[in-house]
Image (spheres, rainbow, N blue to C red):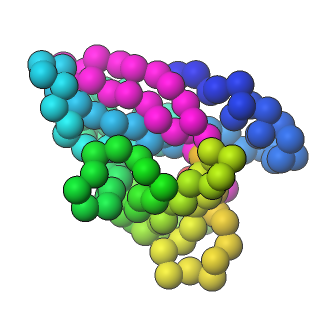
Amino acid sequence: MRLSSFGLIMLGASGISGICANFHVGRVTKLAGGGYQYHRVCPSPKYGCDCFNGAGDGAKAILPSGTNQLGTYFQVQGGWCKGTSGIPMPVTDFYKRSDGHWDMYKNNGDGAVIGTCYSNSDTKSCGANKYEDNLVCYTTWC
């Protein structure tokens, strides 16, 4: 897994310390024919084919109806990771910003940013599926 140069620069410039890559968001397609399956969110420690193919920890990203690419908004179901407090991750909304990064918010929350994502690229073959990493995300939640 590789973090883009832009992501490293932004992370360093943000002054955030003690936070690691908490999770990834990527696209899963069939190897044969390339048919879209879903987008998957996987915690960094579980980054691998089991999570990409839907086993164990992780969650599906919910894209706007009729799309199979990350556009400017998507949502992730809650409960797939727990923070140090033991409280499960809430339903989260992701919005793409003009500079290309994504801000993460608690759905129906107070409007505070609870995480940030940056473009990433990695590809893995996982059985009959191919996983393409799109985002690497940082939050204090997971």
The chief SS type of the magenta part is strand
Region rendered in magenta: 118-141
| Relative vertical location of residue 71 with respect to residue 123 in this rendering, above or below | below
Whole-percent x, y for residue 110 in the image: 63, 82
The residue at 83%/47% (across/down) is 14
Whole-percent x, y for residue 73 in the image: 46, 59
- Camera-nearest residue between 63 and 124: 63
- Camera-nearest residue between 74 and 85: 74
- Camera-nearest residue between 35 and 78: 35
The residue at 83%/37% (across/down) is 12
Q: Left or right? Give the position of 45 relative to 62.
A: right
Magenta span includes 140 = yes
Whole-percent x, y for residue 67 in the image: 28, 51
The residue at 56%/54% (across/down) is 96
| Relative vertical location of residue 21 with respect to residue 3 in this rendering, above or below | below
The residue at 34%/36% (across/down) is 27
Residue 8 visible to the viewer: yes
Residue, far front:
98
Magenta span includes 24 = no
